[in-house]
């Protein structure tokens, strides 16, 4: 057989309207029981697939018939197969004892499934009417079977049992229900986490299955959505009509879904069985529909694709627009034939129905019937996984399809939300519902809680309806009576290829304490996430405060001291980081950074692969949200890994140092080419996503997300790697508080090193709903939170003579021309000095402050006799005041207030020229002072004990001078210097 499966069976001829016929499961089981062959079939070569990184969001349950062998499993795309059900287990109806396991206990396919994380089920079959009568009348046999089934799955570490009991009469309905309940209770008790599933008929002709009673006990209901047209059909037609093929036989996949949902099956538990086979008949004509003239034979999808006969060519392919089904019609030896097998186009519509009805997923009969071809695997990825892409334009019908009326008792909700769309429109080309009983509602958004656009019934069409955002939701209901033609609508969307924009609205001027920074974010559609980064300059390099989750490393100052190398040869060259030891498989350069679930985190860096090494497994990347960077796989963490030789982008989760691959997406990496990498992680939802050069390349959602991390770690395997510009951002609202201060609990600890070099930088980047990033914007802010160093001194009447006066006498007008020592501030510089004087230090009741840009000032005129104190403080560029510095004070008195003592003091000559004689009886040594008319001390001497003294006046300029003798009393007199 060489791996080519072409199943040919002769059936007893049934009329189309027969209520029961042998299913394909039974027919093929009986055929291979009579025609066994060894497990020697090797998998056919399958075209390469890009689905390895896709994560399922629906159940994909596949029956693996024992007769296809185990080699074909090499072509199973395990990440797209949630459940493998081994077909089949046979038993004695009288005793419940096993009669055939058909390799379940030894087949390598079970081991492969388990090692790939696919849940394994064992299918137990019972098709014979006599067996039904015996089994359902024998509780002992039922109990034995339950025990044997559970023992069997425990022996293989399987987690599920699938019942395929077909043709059961309605008289056994109660016994069947009770058996399923007993089996469910035992299975779930003995095997925690196990599941019980049932293969249901496409049409429950005998009303045998009490699904409403079983819904609480059964985990999956998989209806066998095939053999609607079977080998014995009198009309050639689709094995799996999506909608009504011909009006005389109105049973379809769509109707079956409605039937079981209305009967009480939970939508999430209902799976639609899909056939990877069909039937071929000799027919009266090549046109459709056509009557059959012989019993049909089965054809697998593989047989159609291989086309060894040449009959299944593109030229012979036909399409039925009523049931949305593919077929091949041809003539051979003068006879007409029609082969009805669903191809990728037909299966695409069937998978769409699963999403429209929002049921649990699909069941496949049977795995390997497509061996060698990836068409259906690609569809599974495109419809039921994280790789799914909703087209920007498509057609939607009521559940009767393009040309037939809808069915009774329909209730469903469907959201149209194409990727990267900014708007959706829905244009109704046909609309006809039973007025007042059957209705359609349209909502402006991604659910029925969105604003209602309108409700419609009868023939008044909604026309064209447009969304205000990127989604529309429709809800449809039909009652149990009249069904009209229904509706047809075409949706279109407007895609978003315009990136968003962000602006940092930082405060102007110097910041001396905590401050608010605002952001203006905009997009033509809607912003999804906004991120910010706070950097501080320590005088040498820009850093982020790791206690707030911010990280910034540009490698512009050599190896950073806050990073630790645990393994690898790490160095900095040309302001970039390089790891140069290609012999190591798990290098580790790590840094502490605290992260938690209060934010969404964006990790951003640049990287490139170095020159080629002698390896074919070169990879570079990083661990993020690490619980312990010192451990082999950083204990608990996520990892983004990029493979050069495999050309892959991979996302992993590491738990207790065991890593689990979550995505595996192709990407054309090149040597010596810089790539910009962005990794987003949301600890609340578990969403991980990777962008390369701002294109989203991979994503997955962790159902048990890590909530905190303490480190970030670079990892290189068996190659040279370069990194640069590593940053971590966190999510933000429109306004954030930036804390400032010297301790590490503040975001900004450092002040400007000088007035021209800011110490704070705020960066912003945003992501819109189309997964487009904005450019990074930033704003620099000057920080100074310490007061300047005060002047060391301030003097009274210091300038310009540079003498600090303590006492002055004057006539006319006298100014306090003062000066102070120079103040100092490294951060923002000294802007001004503020001088004043008063009766005491700090007294500002007499004068206003005088601002000066240097260390001198004219404060004002001495107005009254008395003591004065000069004081000063400086102000830096940030507006902070230094401490106030005070003088030692000065006594000032106008000469007009002095008592003239010329009767006691005689001066000669007066006017004087080069000298003057002072005649006074000095009984002790007294201090003699001569003041100029502006009050400044011009000359000072001591008298000794004498009746007169002689003073040299050569140093004095001509003018009026005042003499002061400090004796028991202060004596004054005046003279003129010529």
Image (spheres, grey):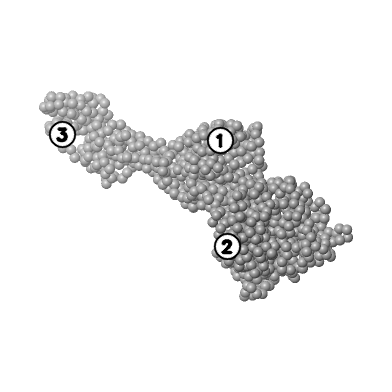
Task: Specify whether 39 is left or right of 333.
Answer: left
Depicted 94 relative to depicted 158: above or below: below
The residue under label 1 is 587
Task: Specify whether 588 is left or right of 832.
Answer: right
Cα gap from disc 2 to disc 3, whole angstroms: 123 Å
Tag 2 near tag 1, CB within 8 Å: no
Task: Specify whether 839 is left or right of 572.
Answer: left
Q: Position of residue 207 (x, y in %)?
A: 65, 69
Q: Earlier in the sequence, mark 1 or mark 3?
A: 1
Say which of marks 1 and 3 sits in front.
1
The residue under label 3 is 970
Q: How many marks?
A: 3
Depicted 116 relative to depicted 565: above or below: below
- Residue found at x 23% / y 26%: 953
Image-quadrant location for residue 421: bottom right
Q: Position of residue 369 (x, y in %)?
A: 73, 53
């Amino acid at each position: 057989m060489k791996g080519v499966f072409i199943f040919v069976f002769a059936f007893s001829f049934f009329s189309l309207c027969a209520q029961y016929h042998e299913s394909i499961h039974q027919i093929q089981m009986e055929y291979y029981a009579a025609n066994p062959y060894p497990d020697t079939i090797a998998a056919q070569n399958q075209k390469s697939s890009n689905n390895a990184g896709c994560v399922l969001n629906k159940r994909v349950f596949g029956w693996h018939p024992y007769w296809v062998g185990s080699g074909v499993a090499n072509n199973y795309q395990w990440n797209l197969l949630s459940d493998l059900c081994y077909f089949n287990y046979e038993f004695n109806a009288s005793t419940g004892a096993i009669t055939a396991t058909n390799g379940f206990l030894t087949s390598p396919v079970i081991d492969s499934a388990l090692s790939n994380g696919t849940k394994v089920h064992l299918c137990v079959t019972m098709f014979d009417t006599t067996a039904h009568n015996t089994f359902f009348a024998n509780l002992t046999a039922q109990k034995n079977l339950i025990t044997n089934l559970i023992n069997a799955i425990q022996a293989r570490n399987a987690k599920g049992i699938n019942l395929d009991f077909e043709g059961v009469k309605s008289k056994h309905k109660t016994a069947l229900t009770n058996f399923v309940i007993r089996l469910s209770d035992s299975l779930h008790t003995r095997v925690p986490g196990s599941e019980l599933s049932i293969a249901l008929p496409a049409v429950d002709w005998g009303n045998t299955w009490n699904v409403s009673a079983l819904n609480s006990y059964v985990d999956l209901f998989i209806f066998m959505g095939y053999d609607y047209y079977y080998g014995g059909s009198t009309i050639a037609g689709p094995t799996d009509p999506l909608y009504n093929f011909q009006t005389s036989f109105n049973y379809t996949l769509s109707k079956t879904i409605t039937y079981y949902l209305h009967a009480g099956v939970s939508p999430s538990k209902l799976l639609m069985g899909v056939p990877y086979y069909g039937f071929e008949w000799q027919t009266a004509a090549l046109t459709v529909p056509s009557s059959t003239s012989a019993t049909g034979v089965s054809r697998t999808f593989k047989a159609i694709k291989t086309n060894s006969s040449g009959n299944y060519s593109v030229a012979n392919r036909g399409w039925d627009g009523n049931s949305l089904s593919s077929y091949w019609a041809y003539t051979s030896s003068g006879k007409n034939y029609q082969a009805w097998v669903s191809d990728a186009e037909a299966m695409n519509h069937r998978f769409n129905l699963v999403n429209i009805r929002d049921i649990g997923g699909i069941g496949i009969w049977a795995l390997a019937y497509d061996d060698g071809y990836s068409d259906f695997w690609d569809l599974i990825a495109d419809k039921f996984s994280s790789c799914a892409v909703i087209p920007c334009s498509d057609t939607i019908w009521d559940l009767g399809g393009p040309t037939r009326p809808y069915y009774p008792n329909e209730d469903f909700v469907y959201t149209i939300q194409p990727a990267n769309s900014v708007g959706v429109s829905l244009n109704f080309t046909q609309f006809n519902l039973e007025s007042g009983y059957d209705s359609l509602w349209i909502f402006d958004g991604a659910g029925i809680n969105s604003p209602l656009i309108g409700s419609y019934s009868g023939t008044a069409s909604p026309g064209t309806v447009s969304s205000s955002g990127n989604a529309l939701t429709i809800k449809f209901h039909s009652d149990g009576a009249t069904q009209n033609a229904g509706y047809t609508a075409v949706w279109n969307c407007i895609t978003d290829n315009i990136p968003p924009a962000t602006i940092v609205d930082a405060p102007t001027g110097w910041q001396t304490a905590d401050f608010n920074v605002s952001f203006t974010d905009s997009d033509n559609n809607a912003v999804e996430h906004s991120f910010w980064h706070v950097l501080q300059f320590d005088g040498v390099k820009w850093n982020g405060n790791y206690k707030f989750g911010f990280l910034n490393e540009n490698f512009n100052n050599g190896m950073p001291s806050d990073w630790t190398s645990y393994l690898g040869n790490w160095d900095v060259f040309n302001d970039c980081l390089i790891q140069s030891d290609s012999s190591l498989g798990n290098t580790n350069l790590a840094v502490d950074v605290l992260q938690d679930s209060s934010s969404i985190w964006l990790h951003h860096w640049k990287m490139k692969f170095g020159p080629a090494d002698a390896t074919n497994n070169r990879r570079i990347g990083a661990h993020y949200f690490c619980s312990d960077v010192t451990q082999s796989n950083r204990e608990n963490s996520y990892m983004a890994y990029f493979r050069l030789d495999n050309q892959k982008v991979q996302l992993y989760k590491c738990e207790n140092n065991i890593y689990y691959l979550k995505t595996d997406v192709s990407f054309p990496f090149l040597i010596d080419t810089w790539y910009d990498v962005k990794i987003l992680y949301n600890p609340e939802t578990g969403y991980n996503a990777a962008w390369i050069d701002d294109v989203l390349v991979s994503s997955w959602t962790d159902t048990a997300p890590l909530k905190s991390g303490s480190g970030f770690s670079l990892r290189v395997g068996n190659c040279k790697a370069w990194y640069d510009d590593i940053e971590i951002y966190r999510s933000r609202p429109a306004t954030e508080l930036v804390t400032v201060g010297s301790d590490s609990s503040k975001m900004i600890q450092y002040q400007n090193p000088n007035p021209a070099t800011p110490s704070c930088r705020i960066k912003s980047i945003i992501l819109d709903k189309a997964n487009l990033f904005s450019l990074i914007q930033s704003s620099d802010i000057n920080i100074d939170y310490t007061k300047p160093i005060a002047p060391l001194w301030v003097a009274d009447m210091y300038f310009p003579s540079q003498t600090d006066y303590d006492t002055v006498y004057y006539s006319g007008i006298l100014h306090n021309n003062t000066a102070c020592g120079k103040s100092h501030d490294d951060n923002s510089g000294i802007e001004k000095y503020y001088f004043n004087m008063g009766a005491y230090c700090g007294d500002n009741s007499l004068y206003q402050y005088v601002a000066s840009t240097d260390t001198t000032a004219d404060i004002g005129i001495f107005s009254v006799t008395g003591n004065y104190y000069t004081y000063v403080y400086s102000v830096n560029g940030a507006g902070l005041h230094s401490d106030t510095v005070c003088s030692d004070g000065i006594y000032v008195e106008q000469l007009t207030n002095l008592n003239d003592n010329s009767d006691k003091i005689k001066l000669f000559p007066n006017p004087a020229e080069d000298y003057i004689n002072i005649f006074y009886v000095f009984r002790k040594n007294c201090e003699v002072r001569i003041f100029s008319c502006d009050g400044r001390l011009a000359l000072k001497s001591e008298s000794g004990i004498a009746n007169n003294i002689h003073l040299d006046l050569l140093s004095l300029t001509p003018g009026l001078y005042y003499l002061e003798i400090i004796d028991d009393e202060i004596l004054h007199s005046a003279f003129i210097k010529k």
